[in-house]
Structure formats: C-alpha cells, structure tokens
Amino acid sequence: MLDSADRLLRYVEFATVVIAGIVIFLVMWVGVAEIFSRKLFNFPLYGQLDIIELTMSSYALLPISYCWRAAGHIRVDLLIDFFEGRRRWIVELLTTVLALALITAIWPGVLHFFDNAWEIGDSTINTQWPTWPSKFVPVIGFSILWVRLVIETLAYIRLVAHPSLAPVAIPEHHDVVAETLAQAEEIAGASTKGML
C-alpha cells in the first residue's frame, strides 16, 4: 500500500515540478522582454513586476514535496549518517513527525490567507490583478507535502518495527562523499582525455 501511494503521489509531484519549471521559464522570458522593451524602446512592460510577484509562489512552493522526496531540502545528513538500523529509522521518524507537525500547524494560516484574498477581492497595486490564485498555490503545495509526510511517517514506523525490511516511500538519500568522489574522477578523466 505504501509503495502504491508513493508511486501515485510521485505523478502528482512530477506534475507540480513541470508546472513550476514552465512558470519560471516563462517568467524568465518576461524579464528578458522587459529589459529589451525598456532599453530599446523606452517602453516598460505593463505589469511585469506584478507578474513576477503573482507567479513567485508557483515555482517556490509547488515543487516543495518533490524536493522533500528527492532529499533536496536542507538536512543534517552528517548527524543522521552516524546511526544505522533501527536507530537511524527512529531519528528519521522523529524528524519527519516534526516536519508533519510544522506543516499541520502552518496549513490553516495558509488557507486563511487564500480565503481572505478571495473574500475581500485582494489585488495587486499596479495592475489590480486578483491575488487569490497565487495565494491558493501554497495551499496546494503544502497539501501535497502533508500527504507526502504522512506516507513517509508510516514508512518509517514500518522500518522502526521491522528494520530488516526494504525501505519504501522514503526520501532518496544520496551519499554526498561518494557523489563528490565520482564527480572528481569524472572531471579528472575528462581533463586527462583533453590533454591527450
């Protein structure tokens, strides 16, 4: 069940990352167009700053669950790597439960900000565009992360109870030292080929 839930959620997380990537790509081109328009024609793009403000939450918070699953967030791996077996899973479980408690505490406030913007018809200063869509994005991002953390909590409880089982539905931890050594060898090999 955990594996199925994890695989299903991965599709959702991948979709949010793709959406965030497209948004940031388009925002980049809006910035380029603004520079050219201002410098060449002395004509700034109308609403360019508002577009950036309204889209910022999309590429900052939509991929947050994907980042968590990929272990791309800030972690104290040096401390966790000291533990093995059941002790490691207990430490991982505690940090995941703390993250889940934090997201659970934050979520009502995030929902309140969206609801308030919807109710009062909040808009940007310059263009008067509504802000509720950008304030709804954190609700989506944190909801997906909440589901990810619940799945991960159950996965760690399973591993604490049975440490010998294969890990399922937990973040993909990378060995930083091994990755660095592999990259150094790759660079050294490429530079040696270049010299020959």
Image (tube, grey):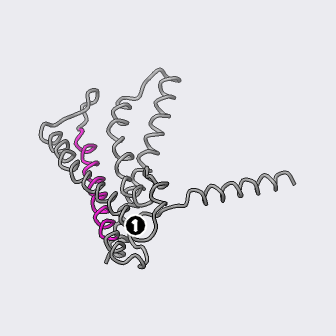
Q: Looking at the figure, which quarter contains the N terminus? A: bottom left
In the depicted structure, whether residue 135 falls above or below residue 43: below
In this view of the protein, which residue sits in the foreground, 63 or 2?
2
> Is residue 40 found left or right of 123 in the rendered image?
right
Q: Looking at the figure, which quarter contains the C terminus? A: bottom right
> Is residue 186 found left or right of 31 in the rendered image?
right
In the depicted structure, whether residue 155 falls above or below residue 31: below
Q: Which residues are magenta?
A: 131-155
Q: Residues within 10 Å of mark 1 (few under 14, many from 20)?
A: some
Q: Residue at x 37, y 31 (%)?
A: 49
Q: Percent position (x, y) of residue 181?
A: 66, 57
In the depicted structure, whether residue 178 falls above or below residue 29: below
In this view of the protein, which residue sits in the foreground, 73 or 162?
162
Residue sitting at the far right: 196
> Is residue 43 found left or right of 61 in the rendered image?
right
- The amino acid on which the numbered mark 1 sits, given as a three-letter code, is Arg
Q: Residue at x 81, y 54 (%)?
A: 192
Residue sitting at the far top: 42
Q: Quadrant of residue 169?
A: bottom left
Q: How many marks?
A: 1
Q: Percent position (x, y) of residue 98?
A: 29, 55
In this view of the protein, which residue sits in the foreground, 14 or 148?
148
In this view of the protein, which residue sits in the foreground, 3 or 13?
3
Which residue is disc 1 drawn over? 87
Q: Is residue 129 magenta?
A: no
Magenta: main secondary structure = helix
Q: Residue at x 43, y 52 (%)?
A: 75
Q: Percent position (x, y) of residue 25?
A: 47, 45
Q: Percent position (x, y) of residue 13?
A: 37, 60
Q: Is residue 143 magenta?
A: yes
Q: Residue at x 39, y 46 (%)?
A: 59
